[in-house]
Amino acid sequence: MLNPTLKILIIDEVESLLISGLISANFEVDYLPQLSKEEIYKCISDYEGLIVRSKILLTKELLLEAKKLKFIARAGSGMDNIDLEFATARKINCIHAGEANADAVGEHTIGMLLMLLNNLAIADKEVRNKIWNREANRGTELSGKTIGIIGYGNTGKSLAKKLNGFDVKVLAYDKYLQNYSDSNATEASMNEIYENAEIISFHIPLTNETRMMVDEKFLKNFSKKICLLNLCRGKILKLSALIEGIKAGKIIGAALDVLENEKLSTLNEQQQTDFDFLIDSKKVVFSPHIAGWTFESYRKISELLLEKITNLELSK
């Protein structure tokens, strides 16, 4: 087990049970979520452990300052804010809590999909404005549809499990798995998904390989009109390609929990143009990167990280 005399720095807000649990295990813990980037650079060399969410990019330059660092724990699922290649080269263990928010993401995906198919966002807004328009808001049933899940890890599996009972066919593609068909989904090639899917949901990490993977060429491969759901990372999807697909009638609905640039006050001219189109479209529903961010997942993330940290096989 990890030597409990190691010093751990926490630079983002986490559930208190993680802090108290580490202290109870006799770790030295500094909980300093208010630290600025400059302050982190100055003090990081004092710590063997670092717990983060999304506050800062852990670049090669920062990790070079972390001369004692033995592990980085990400209080979430994605690891794209960490230079994993450099961290691995420095023998820094990188762990995350992707299992902890899988249920939250699966439920949120179902919610956004049902909103799309049943025009719930539009209907709610209209009724609040005393518009009672039944025919224009006629819904489409999920039953009988073929759903393609790209990425069959924690959240992909969670979504498939929650779709079981909706009388749908679920095809799953994961480049890095083999023989992963189960009672909730059937292993499929991308060509099979291109040919059959009517709904496509992405559950993949952001890497150099997946960055802007979903572009015009990718979307043109689908034989049928599709609903597209992105609840993983905004930069896997090229928004201009999504817009082109909506305009062409290829994409009949989109649910976006993430965007290329989520700092909406910093959008450049093209990003603002794309965003304006999407917010004016009745075929798009949004949420502010909260799919995995529930009261329950917040606690489960800390519980899981506490378990993983205390079981790391490292020495002082």
Image: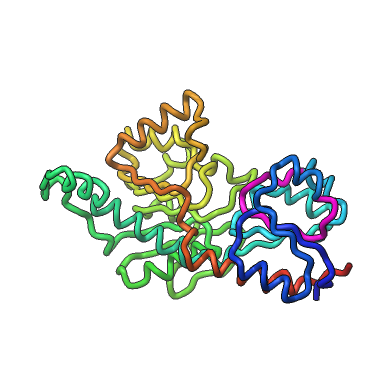
Q: Is residue 126 something that shows in the picture? A: yes
For the point 10% across and 47% down, the residue is: 132
Q: How is the image coloured?
A: rainbow
Residue 34 is left or right of residue 187, and the answer is right
136 and 29: which is toward the camera: 29
For the point 53% across and 62% down, the residue is: 152
For the point 46% across and 62% down, the residue is: 294
Coordinates of residue 68 in the picture (x, y in percent): 86, 56
Residue 91 is left or right of residue 29, and the answer is right
Numbered marks: total: 0
Q: Please check the rendered image and state whether residue 51 is part of the magenta-colored stretch, yes or no.
A: yes
Residue 14 is left or right of residue 168, and the answer is right
Q: Residue furthest top?
A: 269
Q: Is residue 93 something that shows in the picture? A: no
Q: From this view, report whether residue 295 is shown above or below residue 234.
A: below
Coordinates of residue 3 in the picture (x, y in percent): 84, 72
Give the magenta-colored segment's residue range.
44-59
Q: Quadrant of the N terminus?
A: bottom right
Q: Quadrant of the C terminus?
A: bottom right
Q: Please check the rendered image and state whether residue 248 is part of the magenta-colored stretch, yes or no.
A: no
For the point 35% across and 49% down, the residue is: 227
Coordinates of residue 245 in the picture (x, y in percent): 37, 37
Coordinates of residue 239 in the picture (x, y in percent): 45, 36
Q: From this view, report whether residue 262 is shown above or below residue 18.
A: above
